[in-house]
Image (cartoon, helix red, strand yellow):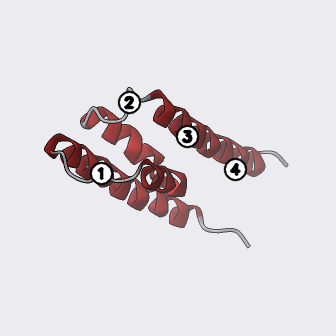
Amino acid sequence: MSIPLLLVLGLYAFMSVVTFLLYGVDKRRASLGQRRIPERTLHVFELLGGVPGALVGQRVFRHKNRKWSFMAVFIAIALLHIAGWAGFVYARTSH
């Protein structure tokens, strides 16, 4: 039994909004000199489906996109998601 596609897309949407908001909060805290959201937390939310929201958050807030060590992990997570979707599409289209 497979998870319905609509449920997966809903999870992606929800996690993307949450991740986007986390990027905004972290940027605000950074500008105020307050305690930051750990990078590991941001990566966990990306891994759980928040990659699109993280990408938008990086652009909108101009945040975390120059730190190469962070971006290397982000890119790896994004590639993992792309591979997963490619596998899903391949499995659905090949008989």
Of helix, strand and loop, which one carries label 1?
loop
**N-terminal-most mark, 4 or 2:** 2
Q: Which residue is mark 3?
A: 78
Q: Residues within 10 Å of mark 3 (few under 14, many from 20)?
A: many
Of helix, strand and loop, which one carries label 3?
helix
Query: Considering only vertical position in the picture, is 56 above or below 26?
Result: above
Contact (CB < 8 A) between labels 4 and 2? no
**N-terminal-most mark, 1 or 4:** 1
Looking at the picture, which amino acid does disc 2 mark? Answer: Asn
Q: Residues within 10 Å of mark 1 (few under 14, many from 20)?
A: some
Residue occupying the far right of the picture:
95
**N-terminal-most mark, 2 or 1:** 1
Q: Quadrant of residue 54?
A: top left
Q: How many marks?
A: 4
Tell me if 49 is positioned left or right of 82 in this view: left
Per the model, the C-alpha gap separating discs 4 and 2 is 29 Å
Q: Which residue is mark 2?
A: 65
In the depicted view, which residue is nearer to us: 22 or 56? 22
Q: Which residue does the image show at 67% across and 41% down from the upper left?
A: 83
Q: Residues within 10 Å of mark 4 (few under 14, many from 20)?
A: few
Which numbered disc, 2 or 1, marks the residue closer to the eye? 1
Query: Considering only vertical position in the picture, is 68 above or below 47?
Result: above
Looking at the picture, which amino acid does disc 4 mark? Answer: Phe
* Residue 36 numbered tag: 1
Of helix, strand and loop, which one carries label 4?
helix
